[in-house]
Amino acid sequence: MSRAAGRRSVAAGLPDVPWDRLEPLKAVAAAHPDGLVDLSMGTPVDSVDPLLQAALGDAADSPGYPLTAGSPALRAAMLAYVRRYCRAEGEVGVLPTIGSKELVAWLPRLLGLGPGDNVVIPEVCYPTYEVGALLAGTTVVRADTPPAEPAALVWLNSPGNPHGRVASAAEMSAWVSWARDCGAVIASDECYLSLPWEESPVSVLAPEVCGGSASGLLAIHSLSKRSNLAGYRAGLVAGDPDLVAELLLLRKHAGMIVPAPVQAAMVAALGDEAHADRQREIYRSRRVVLRQALEKAGFRIEHSTAGLYLWATRDEPGLRTVEWLAERGILAVPGEFYGPAGEPFVRLALTAPDSLISAAAARVLGFPSP
């Protein structure tokens, strides 16, 4: 037997990509006479602000290797951002990342976790938390409150993907206390922090959550939703200086470097609130249109008080609801993709142009598309 034939496949231990199962229903939705309204992915569709495009272009002549730690301007911009936006106090480390998904997927490995370690993820959550834990060979524990057994890493996510639930400062503080008691690292995915609606989320680095100390804490932020930079792959991690320094060393060895033009665009994005405010209002308007239509059509919306999604149910199996929507040319995601507790919900993203959001609203109410 060749070495290749006898090797252990890393991919063999991972779950299937659940979105692949949507392809038949996507075909049904695409066959609608007025076309497909795809609300299954949280992919930005609005233009990148000209200020950020200009910053990227102005830095295009960057022949040398960029700094893994980020340019001095970017490090200053990241630190100012977490001081302002997360209200972080005390000593805080910052580090740019190639978007946020790569950090989510590789963080357990980068922290040196492996078999025998527990990684706690929410009952209903972004699938990559589980994938990252499995890549490291750790044990996945789903829990929305501190479990009985200790852990090495805990993932928090507020506002939550897929449901938009906002955790209170008291809830997050309880997790911080528990994690510090058992020596766990807390990784708080705060990619939707810039989208508050009925509730305002709080960062794990806020003093009322962590007591003014970032010890044992990492906050993960992304410019994909805030600034429409999903295509740029622009994110950052901030928190415990020792943990950030360890991540920096490993990322230097692994070549996990944000390109210099993207770093320049990040400096512009982190320092400008006007473009983020405009984008927030676009999502707010779309959310009102779609939510009102769904509720008039008999859907019940749960949580969804912040973030980029509506967590909706007709109190039937989620896949059946996805089929009902597909027959009307709308593609959504069944809640089960985010964990067994995701039933009987579906997730609908607000990332479609205004015209398609209006079309989806009309279709769920039985009206012709506008």
Image: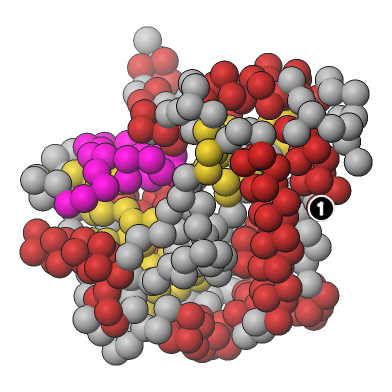
The correct choice, above or below, for 303 with respect to 205 in the image is: above
In the image, residue 8 lies at what x, y percent?
A: 34, 24
What range is drawn magenta here?
Answer: 122-146
Front residue of 6 and 314: 314
Side (left or right) of 249 relative to 223: left
Q: Residue at x 61, y 25 (%)?
A: 322
| Rendering coords of residue 84 (x, y %) | 48, 86
Classify residue 209 as left or right of residue 359: left
* Callout 1 amino acid: Asp
Q: Which residue is mark 1?
A: 354
Most foreground residue, 129 or 308: 308
Task: Identify the residue at image location x=91%, y=41%.
Answer: 370
| Residue 71 drawn at (x, y percent) | 56, 82
| Horizontal arrangement in the rendering, residue 24 relative to residue 307 (left or right) | right
Q: Where residue 364 sits: x, y (%)?
A: 73, 33
Q: Residue shown at 59%/54% (left/top)?
A: 308
Q: Quadrant of residue 89?
A: bottom left
